[in-house]
Amino acid sequence: MSTYKLVCPHCHSRMRIRTSEGTHIFLRVAYLQCTNEACGWSVRAEFEMTHEMSPSGMANPTVKLPIANVAQRRAAMLSPTDHPDLLDQLEMERAI
């Protein structure tokens, strides 16, 4: 299984999610830390759902996001898809 990689912009080591919290249905705040002890950089990050790429098969009428334009959908189709869902990864990192 592949993992979603967050990379430290200073030393290029892997970042780990120390903790995270949902602040809104479309927003999750995470606290990250570089795994390189010599670097030790830590940061607060926000992961936001911004556009609907395709409709849900079980649509909730209270969930309303703008629909992605054609260019955004095409770019998503060209992106690698071998990493797990980001929110699943946040939960897995929190459990460790």
Image (spheres, helix red, strand yellow):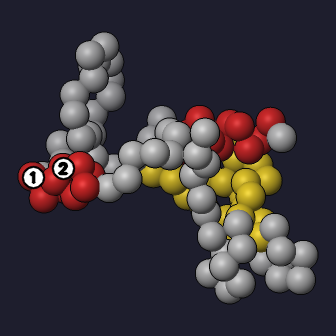
Q: Decide: is 88 above or below 71.
A: above
Q: Decide: is 63 above or below 17.
A: above
Q: Residue at x 51, y 53 (%)?
A: 47
Classify mark 1: residues with Cα within 10 Å, few (<14), some (14-19) or many (20+): few
Classify mark 2: residues with Cα within 10 Å, few (<14), some (14-19) or many (20+): some
Q: Residue at x 74, y 58 (%)?
A: 16
Measure the alpha-carbon separation of dots 1 and 2. Answer: 5 Å
- Tag count in the figure? 2
Residue 82 or residue 90, whichever sits in front: 82
Tag on residue 4? none
Q: Name the residue tied to disc 2.
A: 73
Tag on residue 70? 1
Q: Position of residue 74 (x, y in %)?
A: 16, 53
Q: Of helix, strand and loop, which one carries label 2?
A: helix
Q: Do labels 1 and 2 touch, CB within 8 Å?
A: yes
Evaluate whether residue 23 shows in this view.
no
Q: Decide: is 88 above or below 50.
A: above
The amino acid sitting under disc 2 is: Arg
Q: Position of residue 8 (x, y in %)?
A: 67, 75
User: Quick one: quadrant of the C terminus?
Assistant: top right
Q: Where on the picture, by quarter, is residue 95? A: top right
Which residue sits furthest left?
A: 70
Q: Position of residue 54 (x, y in %)?
A: 22, 34
Residue 33 or residue 60, whichever sits in front: 33
